[in-house]
Amino acid sequence: MIDIPKDEELSPSDRWQRCVGALQRELPPQQFNSWIKPLRLEVNPEGEHRLLVPNRFVLQWVRERYLPMIESLLKENAGQELELILVVNETAAPPNPPPSLADAIDKTDNTIKVATLPNMAQDHHAVYERTRLNTAFTFETLVTGRSNDLARAAAQQVALNPGTSYNPLFVYGGVGLGKTHLVHALGNEVWRQNNRKIIRYVHAHDYIADLVRAYQQKAFDRFKQYYCSLDVLIIDDIQFLGGNKERTQEEFFFAFNTLIEAKKQIVITCDTYPKDIQGLENRLISRFDWGLTVQIEPPELEMRVAILKKKAEVTGVPLGDDVAFLIAKNLRSNVRELEGALNRVIAFAGFHSRDMSIEVAREALKDVIGAHNRQITLELIQKFVADYYKIKVAEMYSQRRTRAVARPRQVAMWLARELTPHSLPEIGDAFGGRDHTTVLHACRTITDLRGKDGQLNNDVHVLLQSIKG
C-alpha cells in the first residue's frame, strides 16, 4: 500500500521525490521507468504546479492512467488541494525529432527525409517517435468479445496483408469503446512484421494542423509528398474533417486516392457510420465504402468484467470477481470509464491502507453508483422500449405473447439486465411477476439474435445509446 508521511514544511522538490518513491514502490518497474521516471515537477512563483513531460504521447498516457494517483499523493503529502497542469517540456525533447510533416521536410533540398531505421522493435519510445504508435496497444492486450470480435478479425487480417485486404478499413463506434486501441494494435503488428514500413498514426486535428502549416509555408507539394510516401496511414476521428474548408477535404481526397492506387493501406476511425458524418463531401464518403466498414459496440457485461480483470493483471493488483462485477454492472458506456473506476478503487484502497474488497469498492464509487441508480430504472427502460416499438407500456408486464409484444419485452429485459444492478427475480417481478428463468431465456435469446439479425442488433444499439443519454 502507498504510504507517504506528511510534512507541510517540505519543499516542492522533496514532496515530488517522496511521491516518486511511493509510486516506485507501488508500480511494476516497467511502468515506473516508462511513465513516471521521465516526469519533473515545477512550481512557478504563483504557486502553480506544473508536471513536465517529454512529449505529447507521455502526456496523454499519464493524464489517462496516473494523474489522479499523482495528484492524490501530492495532496496527502502537502496537506492541501493541488491541481497539476501537464506541460510538454520542449527542452527535454528527444534529440531525434519525430517525422511529422514539418520535421520530414529538408529545408535545403525540399525532399522528404527517409532515415535508415535501426531495429527498434523493443524500444517503445523509438517506435513512437517514428510512427506515433502506442506500443502498449496490441492485439494481445485487447480484450475481445461480441462487441468487437468482427473488428478485431478484420484488423488482424489487414495487419497481415496491408494494402490488399479491406482497403480502407473503416472502424466506427462511440467514444471510449477501443477504436484507438484496435488501430494502434494493427499498426504495431504491421511494424512487428516489417519495421521498414513507413507507418503513421495521425489524429484528424493533427492532419488539419499539418495542412495549415503547409498553407502558411506555401509547401503544398511537400505536404502531398509526405502523406503519399506512407505505407500505412492510420487517421483517427475522421469526423473532425467534416465542416472544414474545401481545401482540407480536397487534399485528403488526393492523398486517399494516391495511397489506394499505390496499394498502400488506409485505416480510419470515426464515432459514427460514414454516411452520417456531418459536413463531409459525398465523394469522400463513397470512397470509405470501397473497403470494409466495421462497428465496435459497447461491451457486454462479461466482456467488461474481462477488461477489468486484464487491467488489474497488467497493473499487478489482485481483483476479486465480486469487485469486478460491481464495477462492470454500474459502468457500462465505455472502456475508458471502466478503467477510470478501477483506478479510483485502487487509489482509494491504497490511500486508506485497506485491502481491495467489495465494501471498499462501494465506498470509492458511491457517487458513481448512486448517480447511475438514480438515472436508469426499470420503468425508464420499459418506457423507452415501448415508445421505440410503438406499443403500450402496460404490455410490457401483460400476459400477451404475440411477437409484436414478446420481442420488445425480451429486449427490455435484456436492457434491464445490462443497464441496472437488479437481479433476475427483480426484473421478472417488474415484467408482470415473471419467473427469473423467463428473464434469463429472454436475455440469452436477444444475445443470440444480435449476432444473426442486423435489424434487431441496430434496434438494441439505438436503445442502449438513447437510454444512456
Image (cartoon, rainbow, N blue to C red):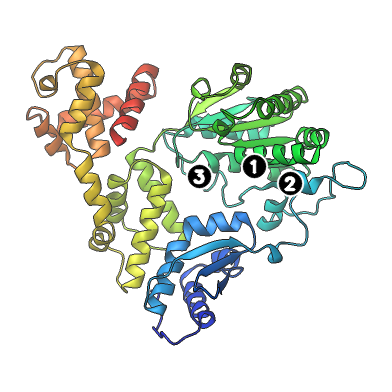
Query: Which marked residue is nearer to the observer: mark 1 or mark 3?
Result: 1
347 lies above or below 253: below
At horizontal 39% and vertical 84% (from top left) the residue drawn is 5
22 lies above or below 461: below
Around disc 3, counting alpha carbons within 10 Å, would you say few (fewer than 14), some (14 to 19), or many (20 or more)? Answer: some
Residue 22 in sight from this viewpoint = yes
Amino acid on which the number 1 mark rests in the picture: Asp
- Residue 118 in the figure: left or right of residue 354: right
**Viewer-proximal residue, 343 or 388?**
388
Quadrant occupied by the N terminus? bottom left
Asked whether the beta carbons under mark 1 and mark 3 sit within 8 Å of each other, the answer is: no
At horizontal 25% and vertical 25% (from top left) the residue drawn is 411
Query: Who comes first in sequence, dot 2 or dot 1?
Result: 2
Query: Which marked residue is nearer to the observer: mark 3 or mark 2?
Result: 2
Cα distance in 3D space between marks 2 and 1: 10 Å
Name the residue beneath numbered marker 3. 142
Residue 128 point in image, percent of width and height: 67, 52
Amino acid on which the number 3 mark rests in the picture: Leu
Local SS, label 2: loop
Quadrant occupied by the C terminus? top left
Amino acid on which the number 2 mark rests in the picture: Ser
Mark identifier at residue 206: 1
Quarter of the figure with residue 239: top right
Asked whether the beta carbons under mark 2 and mark 1 sit within 8 Å of each other, the answer is: yes
Residue 240 point in image, percent of width and height: 56, 34
Name the residue beneath numbered marker 2. 100
Local SS, label 1: helix
Around disc 2, counting alpha carbons within 10 Å, would you say few (fewer than 14), some (14 to 19), or many (20 or more)? Answer: some
- Residue 277 in the figure: left or right of residue 105: left
Residue 41 point in image, percent of width and height: 55, 72
